[in-house]
Amino acid sequence: MSRLTVGDTAPPLALPGTDGAIVRLDAAGHDATVVVFTANGCPYARAWHDRVQEVVRDYGTRGVAVLQVTSNDESDHPEDSVEGMRQRVAAGEVAGPFLRDAEQVVARAYGATATPEVFVIDRHGTVRYHGAPDGDHDDPGQRARWLRDALEDVLAEREVARPITSPAGCSIKWRVELRWWAGCPTRDRAAHVLREVLADLGRDEVAVVEREVRTRDEAQRLGFPGSPTFAVGGRDLFSTAAPPALTCRLYSRPDGRSSPLPDTADLAAALREALVRPWELPGWVDFRTHSARPSRNTID
């Protein structure tokens, strides 16, 4: 899986706000756009929250749009449901569009791993900054300085002096969708294997949702190539050229044989990549210690 980085074109974004109205990324309509993946319960996102709202207010008159997106699975994080979001809006805690990525499609498309995680996009739709709002969630005096510096550079049509920092915060709380069709007998075994592999990876906290695909139209809409299919953020974990269909799926195994289930090592590798946490990214740096060593004590 390739992750969005500086210089890439930002993927389309069309998500509902707390009032149900769809908000779209409109890079050409603004001098700069900021996409912030956030969460209502994450202590890091809450620590940076007011600084991000100040950016919304300070730059709103300068042609900058700030889109704040919650993508966490709400089964264990109901505070990130639309109702939880509405409560914060009603309390006057959020400035600007507050969008719900319930299917986690946008987080997956952007390759986001953390809350908060910031992307600054110029009027041409190009990502110009990616990373954290500033260098310390515990220091309000930093005022989202890295984000502000990036915006000043983009608005002045300069190269961004600090285009990349390590995303820092809580990990995005993903779910894995097991898509199945009743005409295949593999559902129960696939569910067992999936949960077993997640346990082996130490990722028992990841929600598993079993979704029955019943019609050809639904198969077409989901890009469902057969049962069982494993998906994160709307994307099949195993790319295939097979057309959408209500059929039984076959997976290639390392020994060249075909099987109704993927090899467990292949499934583990695909899950590890799709569910990666920020501190597991290559080259990740805890910028508070200037250390490239992962630290579970600093980020959850």
Image: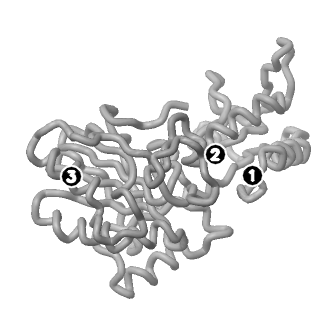
- In the rendered view of the protein, which quadrant contains the C terminus? bottom right
Query: What amino acid is labelled 2 in the image?
Result: Leu
Under circle 1, the secondary element is: loop
Q: Which mark is residue 203?
A: 1
Residue 193 position within the rendered picture, expressed as x and y whole percent measured from the top left: 87, 42
Residue 39 position within the rendered picture, expressed as x and y whole percent measured from the top left: 49, 67
Residue at 44% x, 43% y is 110
Q: Which mark is residue 149?
A: 3
Do residues under tags 3 and 2 come within 8 Å of each other at their CB atoms? no
Under circle 2, the secondary element is: loop
Residue at 26% x, 58% y is 145
Q: CA distance from mark 3 to mark 1?
A: 36 Å
Q: Is residue 20 visible?
A: no
Q: Is residue 122 left or right of residue 188?
A: left
Task: Say which residue label 2 marks.
Answer: 275
Residue 161 position within the rendered picture, expressed as x and y whole percent measured from the top left: 22, 40
Q: Quadrant of residue 266?
A: top right
Do residues under tags 3 and 1 come within 8 Å of each other at their CB atoms? no
The answer to which of marks 3 and 1 sits earlier in the sequence is: 3
